[in-house]
Image (cartoon, rainbow, N blue to C red):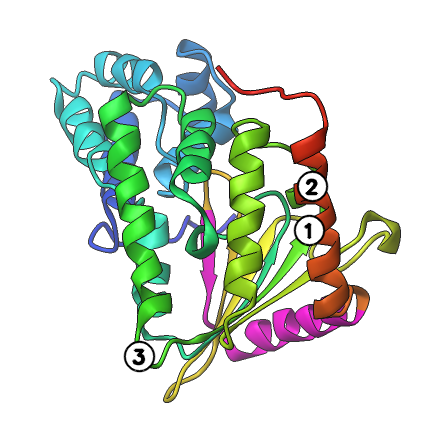
Amino acid sequence: MPAPKELDPSISLPALYGVKLRKLRIRAGFTQRQLGDKIPIAHSRIAQFELGKETPPEDVNAKLDAILGADGDLIDLWGHIKRTPIPDWARKFVEYEAKATRMLKYMAQAVPGLLQTESYARALLRISRPRDTDAEVEELVTARLERQAILERSAPPLLWCILDEAVLRRPVGGHAVMREQLAHVLRMARTPHVVVQVLPFGQGEHPVMGGSLTLLGFERGPDVAYIESSHSGELVETPEEVAEYALAYDLLQAKALPPDESLAVIRSAMEEYSTCAPREST
């Protein structure tokens, strides 16, 4: 079996954490499975931590620090990671996003961050980061809303969004929050640089069912793709892979409703949130 590829600790804080954790584990004489058994968690999670693809929960990190005799080093490093408003795995994407002239997005579960209202963003972040304090959630909300300045430029990028029907049908934050959010999507879709399509459930399977997809195009330089789930993301820069995702997006556009029909569906969903019995979040 070939030796695992060395992770560059300079690329991100999670990568630095992963390199440190692997060194401590090897020094202690544990395999990933043995260390996982001591926590206890699956050894595959240990592998994800060491690859910099996932940051452990606070309680798991504290156990790792104690078991491996890190003398607080893992706890200190974990604190630096969690204090960063934008996760390291998303930072390079955000840098690309700021330079893009064209953004093509497929969203599987939520409204894209660039179109989120403050209330919707807050509800989404609270449910996805239950261990964060209110202050930490507010810091993330502010960071997300600040990114929306991209759409307020004198020459904003084209933002073309395909929303899975699940985005409309699953209420986030309660009915009032969803009404406000869908109304905001409709307002933005009336601007010349924002196009919105809806992909109905009835269209069945499609090539991007594993998560959300963003394709970024630039005035100069090659396109990039970004694959995102709720707690992780992967930036794809290899031209051949980006081309595959671009083809997948073309197929999604063909399956989705035309923009005019899509806005009618969004408007109908918004009206349903106005008429059905309220179910506000607590």
Above or below, 156 relative to 52: below
Discs 1, 2 touching: Cβ within 8 Å: yes
Task: Look at label 3 and name its amino acid.
Answer: Ser
Characterize the local packing of mark 1: few (<14), some (14-19) or many (20 or more) Cα atoms within 10 angstroms. Answer: some
Q: Residue at x 72, y 37 (%)?
A: 272
Magenta-tinted stretch: 233-254
The earlier-in-sequence mark between 2 and 3 is 3
Write down the quadrant of residue 270 in the picture: top right
- Image coordinates of residue 257 in percent, x first then y, are 78, 64
The residue furthest front is 275
In the image: residue 69, left or right of residue 143 = left
Q: Which residue is mark 3?
A: 154
Q: Which residue is mark 2?
A: 271
The Cα–Cα distance between marks 1 and 2, rounded to whole angstroms, is 6 Å
Of 255 and 36, which appears nearest the observer?
255
Based on the picture, tell me whether residue 215 belongs to the magenta stretch.
no
The Cα–Cα distance between marks 1 and 3, rounded to whole angstroms, is 28 Å
- Image coordinates of residue 147 in percent, x first then y, are 31, 57
Q: Which of the two marks, 2 or 3, is nearer to us in this view?
A: 2
Characterize the local packing of mark 2: few (<14), some (14-19) or many (20 or more) Cα atoms within 10 angstroms. Answer: some
Q: Which of the two marks, 1 or 3, is nearer to us in this view?
A: 1
The earlier-in-sequence mark between 1 and 3 is 3
Q: Which residue is mark 1?
A: 267
Task: Look at label 2 and name its amino acid.
Answer: Glu
Q: Residue at x 51, y 30 (%)?
A: 44
Q: Residue at x 72, y 68 (%)?
A: 260
